[in-house]
Image: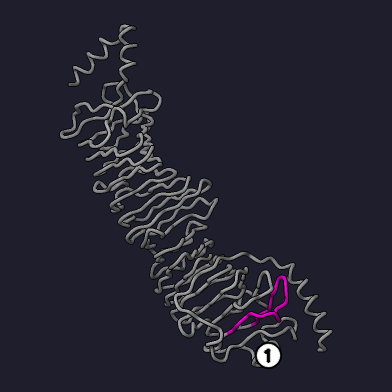
Amino acid sequence: MKSSSKALWRSAALRGAVAFTIVAWVNLQPLVSIQAASLTSTNVWTGYDDYFSYNDPDNWSLGVTPNSASAAVLFGGPDMGTGSFWTIMSGNTAMGKLMFTNSLDVTSVLLQANNPTTDLIQLYGTGGVGIYQSFPRAVSIQPKIQVMADQTWQINSGSLDLLNQLDISTHALTFSGSGIVNARAAVKGSAGPITLNGNSVLNLWSDNSTTLTGGSLVVNAGRLGLGHNNAAGNSGIQLNGPTAVLAPINGYRITNSSAISGTQGAVDVSATSFLRLNGAISTTQVTKTGAGTLLLGTPGVNTFQRLTISQGMVQVSGGTLPTSSEVVLNGGKLDIGRFVEHVNKLTLLADSTVSLTANAPASSLTIDELELESGVWTIEGWDGTAGQPGVGTHIYVGEAEGESVTTGVYFAGLGVGGKLIDSTTPGFKELVPVPEPGMLTLLAGLGGLGLLWGRANRKS
């Protein structure tokens, strides 16, 4: 093909490629530094001699189609043109590394499958690296991907969208960097863990990912997003750091039954999302963030030591808070509903709320140690008469420290602070509303002071 004809074909093909829908991805950072110059036998895309075909040797710098476990495949350089780039892959293709690097002028890249149901990339991860991406572009891969050995995907910039099945088999797959990888279809695996490091993001979208049965989803740092109820399959999820996050993808309502373990992490639920965790939570510390709702769905299984509610709401299902745990209220809401909960300690760090259900047969929170450090603790749904035990709703306190319950507690709807009175539960006082002095004066003027004092004296 003459150069002028080739230029016209390239321009027309690129304009046609714009019609393809490219799904944006996120970038990841490397564990191992890789430079294209240090790679041997690197196959570099050089042109469009055969209708953008991946399988045409004339489109590659070495004059051969890359198809071996040691082949390094590089898409990069000015020969890729501008705008949206795509190439068609056919059959089974083996490669050691798949790279998107150099100063590309394209806005997005699509590796298209000639037959999406059968076309396959077998990725061997030569040198420990399977996919390496260092430019801020949207990359989409349509063929299936089979991971053939333990490897790291280093997406340092841009985004990566997997449009078809990812099969890690028994191998370990590690993501690192600061970008997002979207697994749009099923993720298969039977033993190897999937690990997130750096600021990497992995979104599991498919409800068909129940074949991911072995190993664990390990979040040392970064974000694991769930787009469907069974997106994590039967794999346990580990949160192992202060920047490790588990979250439903924005706008989704998720029920997840995976066990949550590890050292610490956050559960981030956006205002438009909802997450119900039915699996056992044994993470030492877990923090609820985001304006949405987290429901602890299965009673009697959780063993976490500390639950911090910084934003949004945590709901319980009765007995879902471990009796040995500490609940830290740092700006959010704990909804007890109609259930009975008992915790070792409740600490107030900022204005926060506990919600009970009025007129419920039993709605109570028992606290061995109450520490009011800062802010006001608002109690919603308390049912009864000021100065008297609750009617169906109760808050029992073993020991109170810090701010006075008179000024540090507020009973919503009653406009009054709190007071500890004797209860029928040995070793515990009951926290009840008590009017402020100004309210007492008003009641006295209305003839109600004697009645109020009589009730208080009978309880004391």
Q: Quadrant of the C terminus?
A: top left
The image's colouring method is one colour
Residue at the extreme left: 426
Please, what secondary structure does the residue beneath circle 1 have?
Answer: helix
x 40%, y 44%: residue: 314
**Residue behind mark 1:** 57
| 3 displayed left or right of 147 | right
Callout 1, which amino acid? Pro
Relative height, residue 33 to residue 375 (above, below): below
x 53%, y 67%: residue: 181
Question: Residue 224 magenta-drawn?
Answer: no
Residue 143: horizontal and vertical position, in percent?
A: 60, 75
x 61%, y 88%: residue: 43
The part of the image, by quadrant, that contains residue 396 is top left
Residue 71: horizontal and vertical position, in percent?
A: 55, 88
Q: Is residue 301 shown to the viewer in this render?
A: yes
* Viewer-side residue, 64 vs 316: 64
Q: Is residue 183 shown to the viewer in this render?
A: no
Relative height, residue 141 to residue 325 (above, below): below
Residue 401: horizontal and vertical position, in percent?
A: 23, 37
The part of the image, by quadrant, that contains residue 343 is top left
* Viewer-side residue, 243 vs 103: 103
The part of the image, by quadrant, that contains residue 234 is bottom left
Question: What are the residue bounds of the magenta stretch?
Answer: 73-90
Relative height, residue 153 to residue 403 (above, below): below
